[in-house]
Image (spheres, rainbow, N blue to C red):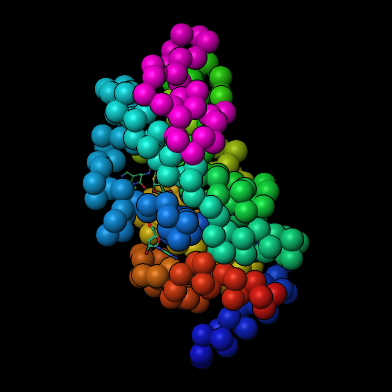
Amino acid sequence: MTDARVLDDLAARLRSARAVAAMTGAGISAESGVPTFRGADGLWRTYSAADLATPEAFARDPDLVWQWYRWRQGIIGRAQPNAGHVALARFQSRLPGFTLITQNVDGLHQRAGSTDVIELHGNIWRARCARGCGVVRETRADPSGAGPAGGEGPLPVCPCGALLRPDIVWFGEALDPRHAGAATRAAEACEVFLAIGTSALVYPAAGLPLVAGRAGAVVVEINVDDTPLTPHADIVLRGTAAGLLPALEARL
Ligand code: BV8
Ligand code: ZN
């Protein structure tokens, strides 16, 4: 089938589905200028996940970890949602049973107009108590990357006296069970599952399209490259999220 026929066919399935779930990864924000993790220019080529994105790293060197997140806040604060984010926000208004799940922490889906986004790995614009007293703070979306947790100033401190940390799920940490539960239920209930711009390597998120497939959903991969999900996908669309999602949305 030609790409246009595949998109026509997929759009017809989406229109007739009672429930649709989409899960995005860093690839959808790549065209907004936000670096991915594992690509040629990915963050893990330059930085070690173990040194930056684990609770042990924060305990060892909170300054370094905050510097890295402030730098990323700067990039994300200057970025704009792209046509892929905008198309997914329109999916939500066109498809009644649509659930958007993201592994991204950048908040670009919400800036494009999506609501009720399930953020599996947290959000870079929030900080929370590292000791776990329950305090959560918004950090300002300042393009310089500065904010209550930003700049070169002292590390942000919780009223309880502990440090604040980025409200992000690091390696070795459990996902918030409310978010993991909602995402699993959406994967089990959907008739079409779209996996968009994710390397499908980080669990438990990478298991969601497999859950959906086992429950009978049509699994669609949208990615510029092959991933471990590719052999399990029913439909593979090779191309960019910002190119393919608007083409699909135009057919809904
Ligand atoms: C947990 C936050 C249990 C950083 C992130 C060995 C085997 C199996 C599992 C494990 C194992 N060892 C450890 C584990 C578990 C571990 C895991 O899965 N590790 C993997 C790497 C082996 N998982 C965990 O630790 C999770 N927790 O299991 O808890 C538990 C239970 C109870 C009690 C205690 C503990 C926690 C996972 C935390 C994830 N957090 N870091 C930050 O953002 O600051 S991971 C990081 O990767 C990001 O969050 C990101 O969302 C996530 C996934 O990456 P992707 O989004 O897919 O991005 P990536 O760069 O990899 O890929 C981009 C893709 O886009 C590519 O495919 C590319 O081709 C494509 N692309 C590029 N441009 C485009 C495009 N596609 C379309 N259009 C384009 N334009
Ligand atoms: Zn506290």
Task: Between residue 161 and residue 194, name the one nearer to us.
Answer: 161
User: Which residues lie in the magenta part?
Assistant: 138-164
Q: In the displayed image of the protein, which residue is found farthest to the bottom?
A: 1
Residue at x 30%, y 35% (from the top left corner): 52
* Vertical placement of residue 87 versus 133, above or below: below
Q: Is residue 127 on the magenta stretch?
A: no
* Vertical placement of residue 60 versus 145, above or below: above
Residue at x 51%, y 67% (from the top left corner): 242
Q: Position of residue 244 (x, y in %)?
A: 53, 73
Q: Quadrant of the C terminus?
A: bottom right
Q: Main secondary structure of the magenta part?
A: loop
- In the picture, residue 81 is in which quadrant? bottom right
Q: Position of residue 232 (x, y in %)?
A: 43, 70
Residue at x 61%, y 48% (from the top left corner): 111
Task: Between residue 236 and residue 217, name the one nearer to us.
Answer: 236
Q: Is residue 110 left or right of residue 237?
A: right
Task: Between residue 196 and residue 85, name the one nearer to us.
Answer: 85
Question: Is any atom of residue 29 visible in this view?
Answer: yes
Task: Between residue 34 and residue 102, name the one nearer to us.
Answer: 34
Question: Is any atom of residue 187 visible in this view?
Answer: no
Q: Position of residue 170 (x, y in %)?
A: 39, 36
Q: Is residue 153 on the magenta stretch?
A: yes
Q: Position of residue 26 (x, y in %)?
A: 43, 54
Q: Is residue 173 left or right of residue 60?
A: right
- In the picture, residue 230 is in which quadrant? bottom left
Number of disc labels: 0
Residue at x 49%, y 42% (from the top left corner): 77
